[in-house]
Image (cartoon, rainbow, N blue to C red):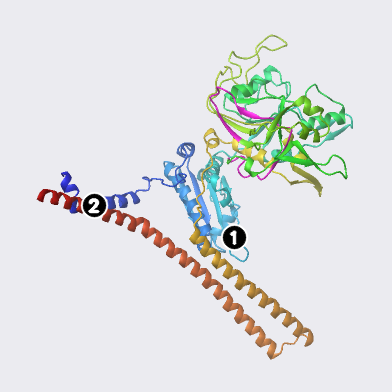
Amino acid sequence: MNKKALFSNAGLALTALGLLITVVIISLLPRIRIDLTEDSLYTLSDATRDIVANLERPVEMTFFYSEESVAEVPQVRAYGLRVQEMLREMVIASNGNLSFEIVDPAPFSEDEDRATAYGIQAVPLAAGREAVYFGVVATDPATQTEEDAGVYQAIPLVRPDQEEFLEYEFARLITRTLDPDPTVIGLLTSLEIDGGFNASLQQATRAWAVMDTVRYMYDVQRIASTATSIDSAIDILLIVHPQELPAQTLYAIDQFVMRGGRALIFVDPNSDTQTQIAVNTGDFRDSMSSDLPGLLQAWGVQYDATQVVTDQERALYVTLQPGQRPVAHLGMMGVQRDGFANDIVSGQLQVMNMSSAGALSKAEGSLTTFEPLIQTSNNTMMMGTAFFSEMGDPTLLLDEFVSEEQTRFLAARVSGRSVSAFPDGPPVADDDANPAETTSADTHLSESIGDIGVIVIADSDVLADRMWAQSQQVLGQRVINAFASNGDFVINALDNLSGSTALINIRSRGRYARPFTRVIDLQRAADERLRAEETNLLQRLSETEQQLTALNQNNGGTISPEQNAEIERFIQVQTDTRRALRDVQFQLNAEIDRLGTTLKFINTALIPGLLVIAALALAWIRSRRRKLAVRQ
């Protein structure tokens, strides 16, 4: 076909027809998909694709979704479609490893009993609305029998406020289904975070509240501060305020991480908790700071154990003595939502309280990825620990403070390939001049086998009860009332680190919902009408009940014909009002559906049609110009 024929009316018509046929073919082939959304919402990450495509055995996914009930709630209905699309994308990428079904549990049905058996309960969307099911279950069919549902994992409620982490939650659900064994935490600490014995009082001390939660969710093994090996059964190292660890212990930690072990590490330039313990027991040390010499640097983290962050904007107020006015303590800070990264570990936190924390940054020349999780404001100043420990009055910090106008990072995630902090092999033991034993491996690793997974927090006081929780005894049980999100951060971090490397590498995504002002205006107008009519109904109900009560008291409980007529009138009013409420909701959905149909027509027919017309018009104009040019 020559150029003239291509741009003729017939040629353009054939081109338009070919485009239409192509669109139809693509719509019929679900594996051919193009994601044109702003944040690539429907494009799975490589990590998720790796997880679902390499499952050991098939997994069945079930979305318990009250589709008919949410049909009258546009926002929930849109989010339900988002969940379905995400699950379908994972099924497509799984190469047959995943299957997916949607179940709408009708009341008193077998499907409802099935949902209940999986721990999924119907929840009301709002006062006066019908409760709906909105949960996802992953099951291992290889473990199912006629009498037993087998191994399964469930998300009882897929919450819209955690939409950014939807992909991560589903990937985690699938991996946990095939690997349900509890995670083993190895605890190494110089503090009595897991309970101990107070020699001065000759009595045992309770574990910190955070450890009660950790032990409830995970298996915990204690690791001595002089350990030369790490048990192969341990999945995650929880290291809290490590002080003066011998080289052999540092080497054991290093090799654990090089072999793919995960680590959650709390270091501290100045432990207020340890200082308070020393005051009470007289057990003073030369330094109240902690570090992992050489290890953090090798893994890509720069940390100075002699410097404390002070933050004027996030400073907490403390009372020095009863009856005195609270004063700002620049060394104690309350980090609000704007200080948390949009990460599965920190993205949903509300506030975290920290005390005399240090600062973290990416080590120069490091090849690992350094991702901040918690940060200060930019109104900060670094102060030496010597000055800080000697300071008894926090108001002195105000006198010394001069803002350096720099944001500091208080917690960070480190991932990627890393080198060992011991490039020359195991260190020589102090006692027998023999190399330290390797940890469950005979060969030394000078670099990591795969990507490492380490989360570092430059504060250990963040775990202390006084910073985030109050506990009390209720019927012999310890009840923890949290006033900050410190404990949530620890559990989120351990939960994230307990997954595979691919799972850890799944990042948060954008949100499906976009401000749709027309729909929002329709919903707001309908809600105002609904509330007004509901208020009138409740007011009429209250007035009628009062009238009936008064009549019953005056007439000894007998019902007169007038009272009976009043009751019948009220019942009719109630019926009419409820019908009006249903009509308002029906009209709302009808308007939204009409709007959606119009938008679909514009996007799928009108715009392409206009483009074709414009192309034909342009071709006709060019053809006319050529003909005029020939005549001239």
Query: Comparing marks 2 and 1, which lies closer to the viewer?
Result: 2
Quadrant of res 129: bottom right
The answer to which of 120 and 283 lies nearer the viewer is: 283
Secondary element at tag 1: loop
> In this picture, is 175 found above or below 458?
below
Distance from Cα at disc 2 to Cα at disc 1: 53 Å
> In this picture, is 368 found above or below 163?
above
**Residue 357 locus on image (x, y percent):** 71, 32
Disc 2 crowd, CA 10 A, few/some/many (<14, 14-19, 20+): few
Left or right of 549 in this view: 178: left
Mark identifier at residue 618: 2
Left or right of 197 in this view: 234: left
**Residue 375 locus on image (x, y percent):** 64, 36
The answer to which of 483 and 220 lies nearer the viewer is: 483
Q: Is residue 564 magenta?
A: no
Tell me what residue is drawn at x 82 percent, y 27 percent.
390
Q: Which residue is mark 1?
A: 125
> In this picture, is 282 found above or below 592?
above
Disc 1 crowd, CA 10 A, few/some/many (<14, 14-19, 20+): some
The residue stretch that appears in magenta: 343-372
Quadrant of res 272: top right
Q: Amino acid at mark 1?
A: Leu
Tell me what residue is drawn at x 39 percent, y 58 percent.
600
Q: Is residue 216 visible?
A: no
**Residue 109 locus on image (x, y percent):** 55, 62
Tell me what residue is drawn at x 75 percent, y 43 percent.
469
The earlier-in-sequence mark between 2 and 1 is 1
Secondary element at tag 2: helix
What secondary structure is the stretch in magenta mostly built from? loop
